[in-house]
Amino acid sequence: MKRLLFILLSMYGFQVMAQMTPNKRYAPAYEQDCYKGDEMVEAGRNWASRPIKVKGGGKAPGIVTLTKAWNDVWKVYVVSGVLKQAANPKFTKAVDPEYDSKTIVDRKNGYMCEDSGGTDSDYMESCVWRRKNGHSLFAILMGSPTDPVIEFVCFYDYDPATETMTPEAGPADTFKPTQEYYSYSLPQKGKDFIIKEYLLDDDETYVENIYTWDGQKHVFGFKRTGKPKR
């Protein structure tokens, strides 16, 4: 019986890890030799393979502390840029109206981002939710629209007893898309995690898959359809 339980637990562990492997949509980024060593590609390929210690994390570390701990391990350039701004405790937001891009550090709501707007620059978001068991859920999303094209999102459980973030599967790992193109979104306000699918019709219609927060994890809630504001 114990042997059977061990086998079942092992199979479950391998299943979860398999879900956290790189998205096949971005095979060129992960498989072509020219992208080996690219910091974002390496993070996307390997983030699920290791936990992260959060030095001085304490009971409920803020978004800057968690994002910095992540980037101390993976050292992705776009994340480093936002953290450089966040080093100023008074910094909250910077906007470039020419390119409709912005950098946000919202400590109160537990959110950070580099929104590349209408440019081809790299982008990122990070967010933290407080779990009802005293832990925290941390997520960090990043991507590049060109050379290489890539996007991924990582989820971690933060344990205050050990000050450690442990990789875990999230909604993106079990999502079954109905469209070729889709993207992820973390909340600055509210608690929903959103996966947006693009229908590529003349009206540029999209469908948002909304995952709501139950106090411990995100669960699928509902879909809603929308169109870009003109």
Image (cartoon, rainbow, N blue to C red):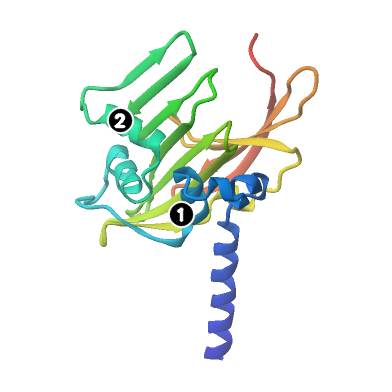
Taking the view exactly as shown, the residue that stands out farthest to the right is 202
Say what secondary structure mark 2 lies in. Answer: loop
- Rendered residue at 80%/23% (across/down): 201
Q: Which amino acid type is shown beneath numbered disc 2? A: Lys
Q: Amino acid at mark 1?
A: Trp
Which mark identifies residue 96?
Answer: none
Say few, some or many: other residues with alpha carbon within 10 Å of mark 1 (under 14 / 14 to 19 / 20 or more).
many
* Percent of width and height locating residue 127: 41, 38
Side of 97 where 221 appears, left or right = right
Lower position in the chain sequence, tag 1 or tag 2? 1
- Number of the label disc, if any, that sits on residue 47: 1
Q: The C terminus is located in which quarter?
A: top right
- Residue marked by disc 2: 108
Look at 34% across and 30% down and name the residue there. 82
Q: Quadrant of the N terminus?
A: bottom right
* Residue found at x 55% / y 90%: 3
In the figure, is residue 1 to the left or right of 199? left
